[in-house]
Amino acid sequence: MKHAAGLLAFVARFAVLGLALAFVIGLFWPGVGSRLRAHFGMP
């Protein structure tokens, strides 16, 4: 069970870091999300 808890903490840490990075990029580069979605053809 200790291994599963460590794996969950590892995944959660990278999820939080990814969201924080996306927030900072969104602050300094507004509109990047919509441009990337348009570039890759996502709705």
Image (spheres, helix red, strand yellow):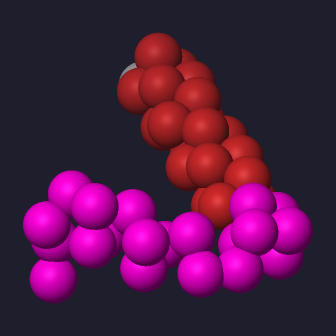
Which one is in front, 5 or 15?
A: 15
Quadrant placement of the C terminus: bottom left
Instruction: Please indicate, yes or no, whether residue 16 appears anywhere in the rendered image.
Output: no
Q: Pick the quarter of the image with the N terminus.
A: top left
Q: Where is residue 41 in the image (x, y as percent from the top left)?
A: 13, 66
**Residue drawn at (43%, 72%) of the image:** 35
Main secondary structure of the magenta stretch: helix
Note whether 2 is above or below 21 in the view shown. above
| Residue 29, horizontal then vertical, whole percent | 75, 69
Please state the extent of the stretch shown in magenta in the rendering: 23-43
Magenta stretch encompasses residue 19: no
Q: Measuring from the top left, give residue 8's x and y in whole percent.
A: 48, 37
Q: Where, by quadrant of the figure, is residue 31 drawn?
A: bottom right
| Vertical comparison of 18 with 2: above or below | below
Quarter residue 22 falls in: bottom right
Closer-to-camera residue (23/27): 27
Q: In the picture shown, does residue 38 fall above or below 5?
A: below
In the picture provided, is 5 more to the left or to the right than 30? left
Residue depicted at x 86% and y 68%: 28
Residue drawn at (21%, 57%) of the image: 40
